[in-house]
Image: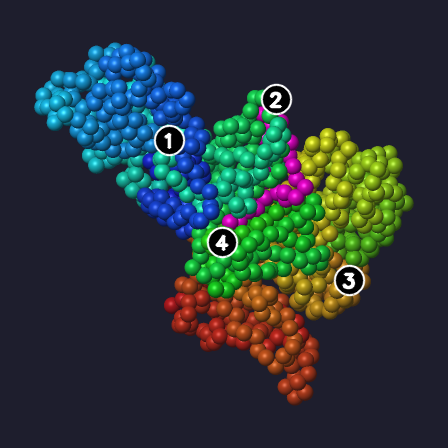
Amino acid sequence: MHAASPAKRTPRAPSPSGHVIFEREDRVFKLYAGKSMYALCVSEAGTLDHLYWGPALPPKVNLKYILRGNVPQPFDPTVNVREADPPAQPSEANAVLSEVMGQTVGGNKSLFDVWKEHRGSEPKAAQIHRNSSKEKDLSAAASTFERRLENMTWRLLGMNKLGDESLETKATSMLLEEGIAAKMLRDDTPLARKMAASSSVESSGNLSDKVSEAGEPAPPRLDFLQHKEAPLRKRGPTFQSAPSNLTNERRSLPESKSERFSGGGVDMSALDLPISDDRLLAVSEAGTEMLPRRVVTHFGVDLPHLSDEAMGVNAAHVPPPLGSPVDHPVASTIERHGKNTTLAELSDMGTGDYRKPSFIVRYNSDGSTISPLTYQSHRIVAGKVSLPSPMPQVRPTPAAPSKSEPASIEPAATTLIITMVDRHTGLKVECHFTAMHNLEVIVRRLVVANSTASPAQKVSLLRAMSATVDFDVPLTQYWITHLCGSWARERHVVHEELRQGIKTFGSMRGTSSHQHAPFFAISEGHSPPEEESGNVFGFSLVYSGSFQAEAEIMDVGRLRVNLGVQSDGFSWNLQPGAEFVSPECVCVFSSEGLGGMSRNLHALVREHLIPPQWRHEPMPVLVNTWEAEYFGVSHDSVVAMARAARHCGVEMLVLDDGWFGERHDATSSLGDWNPNATKFPFGIRGLARDVQAEGMLFGLWIEPEMVSTNSKLYEEHPNWCLHLPGRAKAEGRNQLVLDLTRAEVRDLVFESIAATLRNSAVSYVKWDMNRHLTEAFSVVLPPDQQGEVIYRYTMGVYALHERFVTEFPHIRFEACSGGGGRFDLGILYFCPQVWCSDNTDALMRMKIQHGSSYIFPALTVGAHYSAVPNHITQGMTRKRTRTLVAMCGTFGYELDLRKVPPSDVAVIHSQIAAHKLVSPIVRDGQLYRLWDPFRVSFCAWCYVLKDRAGRATAAAAFAFNMSSTFWSNLVPRLCLRGLDPEALYTVTEPLPNNRTQKMGTLEVVRTPQPVYQLGAEKAALCARPHARLTQSDARLTQFGARLTESGAQFTCLNRFRPPR
């Protein structure tokens, strides 16, 4: 029975996901991604602190209490904020206040001198002080009133600087406390008169004539401070130009909220403050923020089911423009905890955080690497800020929902960009956080900019992690899950318990490598993470070069993880005005274990990463010439293979290595991309024409990054490879690596290959890369830029890919690097699929494809059926098993179809028919890994296709017995996941077994009739436990099947009606 095609999806209702909320009062940012939330804040010291990452919480939840868990530890340096450099202020008002409060008494300058400088005019105390014959302290020279007023003034300014909400109340209280007489208040200054007139203050009615015990008039009650409708900051020109509805904001708010909002500043113009009238007028007219302090600014999808009150916003409120600065935090005068005890979003080096930092810079002027950063500004943008070409990136707009529907132009992402600055050097770091609206995914990256205008300020960037995430102390233990291996054994799953210290892995090979994938997952528990339960945090780098991953448990039990460009050997020369953009890091949260993490990553790759034109374009069934002919290909042999392939139902023939130059073996001709005239007298154009005449599509293999020493290209340009002059050149597979940092090298490579593609009907290109980088030195770069070579090489690879996919959008490119040596999110931006491994042995491919499925969906996994004994392992595996494993990828053939017996032609037809049947489910379905081959000797995958309402309409289940140690044992019951519990499914086996065991002799023999492991060609299955079925085969929900050899089981489920 044919698998159900995806149903037409109905538009999803708006949800509170995929947007950014900024809480100005607490300086907290909340990013909603799918059903998850990521929260961070700007600390009082101006640093960027992590608060929360997990299931979505209501927007109004206050998370600042989490910072109380930052407990100083012995010997951890702490910072007294009065000694620290103050953060840059967002307005002139705060700048003046900061300047006033930052003044200290030094040398012969007394506090009174500081007061006098800011006051601009001399009170009575000044005359006393000036007429005295000996310099006296203010406390001895000034009157009681002036001493008390001075004391109050500094306290008020300090609270105003900290953004204290209750300044008005505290001002009145302090006047009473200090005993300041009403008649001593200055009300004759131009500034006081101006402010009094603007607010209609009648000072005379607010003064008391009572006398204090000190013999001075009692302090005034200052009722105008209690009843003023607008604080000082509300009077500037910025407020005058604000929208009219903002001026009435407070009247429309509930009284309790208005009281909260009133703490933005205090009108101290009528007080005799130690600030000159001109300076205080500047404070008044600077006009800082005109919005209430308890503002929640969000940008993203509509939030229909959340009231304005729940969002903390009045209905009449208009959000401020994007990019409104947060109130710059300034720490109080108490001693704070050091950086080593915080949960940081961005960590610098050498200022108290002893964990691995997010970045390291070296200032060439003095050799220092110290560069503490504090908050400068932030902005929120719809979608994303694009990375510079040709860097790969997560696309903010999703692919079209189907081939017949147009793609949306509306972004499904919102980005928060926070700018941090080193105020001594001008270095800036932009932290990008992109919340994907419909996925539990946050995409992160850094932009490091040398913003100084001084030509002498050169900076070397030595380390740049795309993401730094700190986790608090676990209840049990932290675990890291990562993928490692080697050539022909890629991406094997490893779970490790993290102990105190640093777990680090990565690649220094110039590619993401066979040895380690740029991916890991963090979980908590007594044992490794579960497949479908528990919280898992996944990280994967959108980058194809050398990378570095770190997981560090510190002494107090907290965990820091970093993922980014490999820092060993890396340096980037930042000239004044230059910037470095790090690759993106995809951060995934799952409350459904490793399976939920993978399903989020799969959806991201399908909808937001691979080239959108290939999203709904099935891969043709191909046959590759490599294992059939190796280098011995010719025009006639390839056409004959195409003819045999067509008879078997194959759709495309791919000409692999050996077609160009004098390429008779692996020792020559890489770089000479002209067809060999002897092998192909009609050229590639003539070959493609004849292959098409057989009813087949045509594909071609290339390796553009390499050059053979025995080639015309090398003879003409021996310096075009990566090498250090005067030293030996290390060859790998008899070839050298071209210096793709150079534009002229890329131009020649592109034009020589593009000439063939332009003149030939090529539908598919396999892009290979069969060695790693050595002698990573470019003769065209100066000495101080040699640390950039590997990164620039990767950018050169991307630049070549970009040119090819731009000029040839109709050609599907498949990436390959000795198999799966460059299988990562970066290369998938250009190539919709990657050759998973050179190892096509079905038993070994199960583990390779299982590990690959942690990151990559099946439509990106190159998987083929190959001959036995296997050319690499010499392993023997049944046809059925080889077919089913390949069907969990792109599906194709790696064998000589000319040698297939006539009896097997029908088998191949049935294999292709089964693949076509389930391909829509495997390509678009959500993956549920049922049996883990790294934990048990079985492997099982279930792909579930869901409609737009989230209902499971069809599924394909694959189960494999990988061991024949115990022939008499039954296979465990296979429990399916992801199905609709309210539905009834028909179950079929498109590729039934053809082996059975004779009861008399117990011999396993072939049978002429299919053997269905469910007992019938069709069966009924209800996903709801203990459901009542009307058919007699309800027992099929509890079956155990005996599989011999490395047996395989494959079923296809189709929903047909709900159960009774």
Precedes in sequence: disc 4 or disc 2:
2
Instruction: Tell me the SS state at disc 3.
Output: loop
Judged from this view, the residue extending furthest toward the bottom is 1000
CA–CA distance between discs 3 and 4? 50 Å
Cα gap from disc 2 to disc 3, whole angstroms: 60 Å
Instruction: Judge the density around disc 1: few (<14), some (14-19), many (≥20) Cα neighbours within 10 Å.
Output: many
Q: Closer to the N terminus: mark 3 or mark 4?
A: 4
Front of the two marks 1 and 4: 4
Instruction: Give 520 or 442, whichever is nearer the viewer.
Output: 520
Tell me the kind of residue under disc 4: Asp
On residue 455, which mark appears? 2
- Camera-side mark, 1 or 2: 2
Q: Is residue 859 left or right of residue 346?
A: right
Name the amino acid type tagged 1.
Answer: Asp
- Residue under label 4, please give it: 555
Q: Earlier in the sequence, mark 2 or mark 3?
A: 2
